[in-house]
Amino acid sequence: MNKMPPTSENWQRFRESMPITKKWAYFDNAAVAPLPSPAKNAALRWADEASAEGDTVWPQWAAAIEKTRAAAASMMGAELSEIALVSNTTTGIGMVAEGFPWQSGDNIVTLANEFPSNLYPWMNLASRGVTARLVPVERGRVDFERLLATCDERTKMIAVSWVGYASGWRIDVGELVRLAHERGILVCLDAIQGLGVFPLDVRETKVDFVAADGHKWMLGPEGAGILFVQQKHLDMLRPIGVGWNSVVHQYDFSHIELKLRGCAARYEGGSQNMVGLLALGASLDMLASFGLTSHHSPIADRVLSITDLACERLAEIGAIILSHRESDHCSGIVSFELPGRDPMEARRQCLEKGVALSCRNGRLRISAHAYANTEDVDRLINAFR
């Protein structure tokens, strides 16, 4: 696939692929992203075929979904055998949490400010004698020293988000994995707020597990996501929800033999969300066409440029920017306060003026993708004024 250079013309083309821009200045991709035209068209095509052809075209759908798996693997520098297609981030994290061979007295270390999807699956292990240790995070900054100081000889896993959903803080995945592996600890990464914008190479970082739904920065629909499992961990991670699609002879329904597939697809169990995964594949192809790879991302440069501009303009009207904007840790998420303004009321006023954003932890939050432009930033500022 040809990669396009990061020119203004190409970003305008990106914008034209997003129908949402005709109505909204959309700064809410960290919640639920709008579908681009390729994903919309893939979903409509599936609906037309499902209505007119039934399961006679099922083999074509299944083959197309394998292209989605390949696109996901390429995006992360993974092998096809290491990618499972799952329904959401929670499902992926749950497969790791419930499939890992815990012993009573083990513990898992995570951050106190994680999204619930990266807390409850680990906390739910208490009935198996496993403790979830929650490390406080001060002013949104993730402190690796504090995180590692909470670990001990019974720590088996560190589970953290690549990008904080409320703070926007982006961690150095490779450095965390290196420090954890030195101590014999595995790393499970919630990547939902980074994949689709920032490059992540699973070979280079050596991260053990990655889970992410596609409905945020990957511009896919809800209910279609990715789980990466290092090949060497496949036999360690006990599959849950085993079904016909988990075994090597998955299409021979009369052959009953529990012989698991030698790839991460063993975790998929049964029937898949075909329409969602087809749409996700279309979005991943579109992102790749704009230069996103496991090592490089013009999309990230564009996202950081537009959020830097938004921060400057917000500061001009008295906003207090709470997200850190250091180059190694900033992201497409910006959290801020408007002194004297109720955040929920400010959000309501923005929505009335065609500007979409969120409130998280009592603060306003914008999250701009590469299709946002300076006119969108102007609309944001004018909505607050």
Image: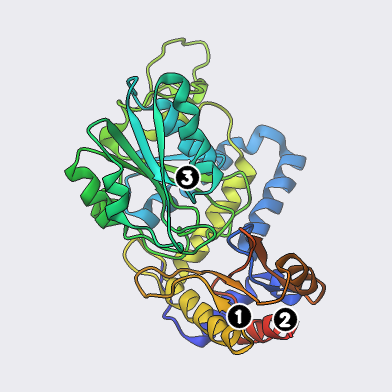
Q: Residue 226 carries which label?
A: 3
Q: Is mark 3 on a helix, strand or loop?
A: strand
- Quarter of the picture holding the C terminus: bottom right
Q: Are the residues tagged 2 and 1 within 8 Å (C-beta)?
A: yes
Residue 344 or 247: which is nearer the viewer?
A: 344
Residue lying farthest to the bottom in this orientation: 316
Left or right for 119, reference 291 = right
Residue 202 appears in the picture as rendered: yes
Q: Residues within 10 Å of mark 3 (few under 14, many from 20)?
A: many
Say which residue label 1 marks.
Answer: 319
x, y percentage for residue 277? Answer: 57, 46
For the residues bearing labels 3 and 1, Cβ distance under 8 angstroms: no
Mark 3 to mark 1: distance in Å? 36 Å
Residue 384 — which label?
2
Residue type at mark 2? Phe
Among the two numbered marks 3 and 1 on one chain, the one whose residue lies closer to the N terminus: 3
Q: Tell me which label, 3 or 2, sits earlier in the chain.
A: 3
Report whether 64 appears left or right of 100. right
